Image (tube, rainbow, N blue to C red):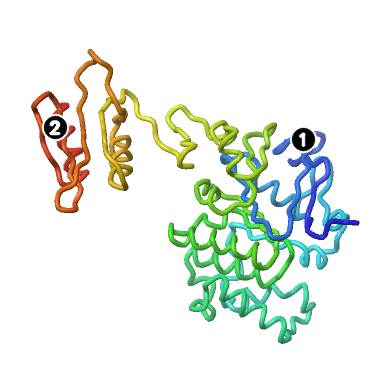
Amino acid sequence: MPDPTRLLQTRDLQTGYRSGSKKTITTKGPLALEVRAGQLICLLGPNGAGKSTLLRTLAGLHPPLEGRVESKGVDVRQLTPTQRARTVSLVLTERVGTHQLTVYSLVALGRYPYSGWMGGLGETDRNAIEWAIEAAGIQTLRDRKLFTLSDGESQKVMLARALAQDTPVLMLDEPTAHLDLPSRIRLMRLLHQLAHQTNKGILLSTHELELALQVADEVWLLQNTATFHRGAPEDLVLNGAFEEAFAHEDIHFDKLTGTFSIQHDNRKPVLFTGEGLPSWWTRRALQRNGFFVVGSVAAGAEPTPRISLIEKEGQPYWRLESAPGDIQEFDSIAALLAGLEQRLH
């Protein structure tokens, strides 16, 4: 029996473009992928790795070079436009050309696969539209014309249109591209909740690696045309896939925190001791300013600045010993950094 939780799957897939007899490969197969109900998948990779092409191929908008994409055992390219629109909804980064439409009218277009060419909206359609508007958090925009919206607002409206379409599979191409940080966090959290609460399969491409590590049930990582990783985000951290995919001489991926950091040339060692939250941010500040934080110094080594995090009347203070007997105290990290620069130059 077919697995009802498997909403979309590929067989021996290879994506790319054809121009006459020439083929341009973007993801080399054979790829065996699947999108399951209740699952949020984040598609990651450097620019030009083929993320958008893979999304369009999975949505049935672009033919694969090899293999096929199936929904319930049927090739999505064989579905009628209406059948496909009831199976997969796709949100792209391009703005909608019809700028004179209101937000409500655009979201209502998501019901087209159900309302037919006459466009009559029944109670079920209106309820779906209202739910989509509320879920996307655009209640205050519903009567605005599209041309008055910012890029970030337009992105939320397109998400609402896709939600109103109410398909088992929802795909989004860089949905956070034009959003500020709080909006990016809220959108990723919303998509995670929607996948689990509505049992939809949601696949999105993004450059928000650190957010993806927090919300994705599975990560698809495109490194280049020949390398494709998939699995739980934690597994891809532990097996080194993230480090390999985004490797660069001046960028380091920290497996412990799941974040990237900039590597500085000619880093200067500094001895630091301390605990708690101020200690964590002190280390971050020292590393940002080109210092290499160590916990001890070997006997006979060159003198190294020593920093101790202490507490006075419940507040953190930083004690700097730049040379034996040369001790200063600072009441902020900014003052500590200024003191370090002054002593070392």
Q: Is residue 124 left or right of residue 235?
A: right
> Mark 1 is on which residue type?
Lys
Residue 157 placement (x, y as % from top left): 57, 69
Instruction: Please determine whether, in this image, residue 173 is positioned above or below residue 128.
Output: above
Residue at 77%, 36% (x, y): give it.
29
Instruction: Please determine whether, in this image, residue 283 is positioned above or below residue 215.
Output: above
Q: Quadrant of residue 28?
A: top right
Residue 185 placement (x, y as % from top left): 48, 58
Residue 243 placement (x, y as % from top left): 53, 33
Q: Quadrant of residue 194?
A: bottom right
* Upstream in sequence: badge 1 or badge 2: 1
Residue at 69%, 31% (x, y): give it.
226
Q: Nearer the viewer, residue 67 or 187?
A: 187
Instruction: Please determine whether, in this image, residue 150 is positioned above or below residue 294.
Output: below
Q: Nearer the viewer, residue 207 or 267?
A: 267
Which disc number belongs to residue 273? none
Query: Callout 1: helix, strand or loop?
Result: strand
Q: Quadrant of residue 344?
A: top left
Instruction: Please determine whether, in this image, residue 264 is positioned above or below residue 202.
Output: above
Say few, some or many: other residues with alpha carbon within 10 Å of mark 2 (under 14 / 14 to 19 / 20 or more).
Answer: few
> Mark 2 is on which residue type?
Gln
Which disc number belongs to residue 23? 1
Look at mark 2 in the image and give the residue it sits on.
Answer: 342
Residue at 66%, 54% (x, y): give it.
203
Spot the residue most to the top. Answer: 300
Q: Is residue 231 left or right of residue 335?
A: right
Residue 41 placement (x, y as % from top left): 65, 52
Say few, some or many: other residues with alpha carbon within 10 Å of mark 1 (under 14 / 14 to 19 / 20 or more).
Answer: few
Spot the residue most to the right. Answer: 1
Mark 1 to mark 2: distance in Å?
A: 60 Å
Q: Is residue 47 left or right of residue 286?
A: right
Quarter of the image that includes the C terminus: top left
